[in-house]
Image (spheres, rainbow, N blue to C red):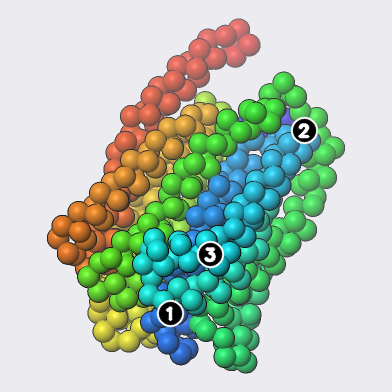
Amino acid sequence: MRSHDSTVQIPTPRRILTFWLPLLATWQMMSVEGPFLAAVIARMAEAKYNLAAYGVAFSLALIIESPIIMMMTASTALVKGKLSYVRLRNFTAVLNIGITVLMVVLVLPPVFRVVTEDLMKLPTEVARITHTATALLLPWPAAIGFRRFYQGLLIRSNLTRRVAWGTMIRLVAMSATALLLALSTSLPGAVVATAALSVGVVFEAVASRFMVHGTIRMLRDSDEDTSDVPEYPGIVRFYYPLALTSILALGVHPMVAFFLGQSRMPLESLAVMPVINSLVFIFRSFGLSYQEVAVSQLGSKLRHYLPVRNFALGLSLAAAAGLALVAFTPVAHLWFRQLSGLNEDLALFALLPTQLLVIMPATSVLLSFQRAILVVSKRTGTMTTATIVEVVLILIVLYTAIVHFDAIGAIAASIALLTGRMGANLFLLGPVNRARIAAAAQNEQTARTPEAA
C-alpha cells in the first residue's frame, strides 16, 4: 500500500479550495444549528430563561465531549491501514464509554445542583430547566466521538463531500425534531433544543458509518508498515495532548458562564452570549474546517508548507471581513432581531460584544494552521501549553473586568475570549517556526541521499 503522503499532489489553491469547501459546508451547516435553535427558543415561552438554560446546558455538554473532539484530527493523521484502523477504533470506543459515564454522573441531581446552583450560581428557574436539557444530551458525546472518527477516515480518503452529506442529514433531523416538538408540545424551549441536537448528531453518526463502509473495507484489505503503527500507549501519548487541548478550550465555556452569572446584567449576558457565539461561529468555521485540510495537505516533513500557508492567509482575511460586514452594518439588526428573534433591548445589548470579536475568525484560521503543523510534526504537546496560555488569559481578563471593574458580562467575555486567543497565537509562533526549520533540514538531508538522487 502506498503511503498517504505519496498520494498527496502539490496543493494548488484550486485543489485546496476543492478539498476544503465540503468541510467548510459541514461546519457552516453546524453553525446554523445554534442560530436556528436560538430563534426557536426566542419565539417560545419564557425565552430569556430558556436561552440562558440552553447556553449553559450546551456548554456543559461541550466540556464533557471535549476529550473526543480531536478524534477527527487523529484518524486523519494516524490511520493508514488495517492495524492502525483497528487500534484507533478501539481507542475511540473506550474513550466514548468514559465520557458517557461522566455525562451520567453530571446529570445526577445532587451533582448537578452543586455544579449549577452552588458553583455557577444560576437562578433557580434557569438551573431547573438546564437540568432537563442537559439530561437530553446524554447521547451527544459518544455520537460525536464515533462520527468524528469516521469523518477523519473520509477526509484521509479524499471523500470530504460525504462528510458534508452527513452533516446535511444531521441538520435535517435536528430541524425537523425541533419544529415538531416546538409546535406539538409544551416543553420548555431549552428542552426542545437539546432533544433536537441529540437526535441530529445520532443520525449523523449512523450516516457517517454507512458512508465510510467502503473506506473501511479497503483499509482492512490493505497492508501497511506495522512498525510505523503506534501501540496503544503510543496512541495515548499522541492523543493525550490533543484531548487536553480540547478539554481546556471547551472548558472555558462553563467558566465564562460562571463569570457571566456574577457580572453586571447577568441574565441579559447569559441570554445573548449563545446568540453572539452562534454568529461568530459561522465565520470561525472557516478556520475550524481548515485544520484537517492542512493536516492532510501539508505532506510529510511539511513539504507543501507555502501553498497551505498562503491559502490560510487569504482565508483569515475573508473570515474577518465577513464578520465585520455583519457587525458594523444594518445586517446586525437583521441577524439579531429578525433571524435570532431577540427583542429590541437584547439585540442592542448584543451589538458591542459582537463588534469586539470581529477579528476572532482570523485568529481561528491561524490557530488551526499552527495546530496542523504541530500535528504533522508530532509535536502535539505544545498545543496543550498554548491552550493553557489562552485559558489563563481568559480567566485573568474575566476576573479583572468583572470583579474589579464591575464590567457588563457579555462585554467582558468578548474582550477575554479575544485576548486569550491572540495570546495562544503568539505563543505558538516560536514552536511552529522551530518545526518548520527542523522539517526543512530533514528535507535537505533527504535530498542529498543517493536514493533521492
The vertical placement of 163 against 9, above or below, is below
Mark earlier in primary sequence (1, 3): 3
According to the picture, the residue beneath numbered tag 2 turns out to be 83
Number of marks present in the image shown = 3
x, y percent for residue 186: 57, 91
Of circles 1 and 3, the one toward us is 3
Dot placed on the residue nearer the N-terminal end, 3 or 2: 2
- The disc, 1 or 2, on the residue closer to the chain's N-terminal end is 2
The image shows residue 211 at horizontal and vertical percentages of 75, 57
Residue under numbered circle 1? 125
Judged from the image, the secondary structure of the residue bearing numbered disc 3 is: helix
Query: For the N terminus, which image quadrant?
Result: top right
Label 2: element kind: helix
Q: Amino acid at mark 2?
A: Leu
Residue that numbered label 3 is attached to: 110
Determine the secondary structure under disc 1: helix
Asked if the residues shown at circle 3 and circle 2 are in contact, with their CB atoms under 8 angstroms apart, the answer is no
On the picture, is 437 further left or further right than 358?
right
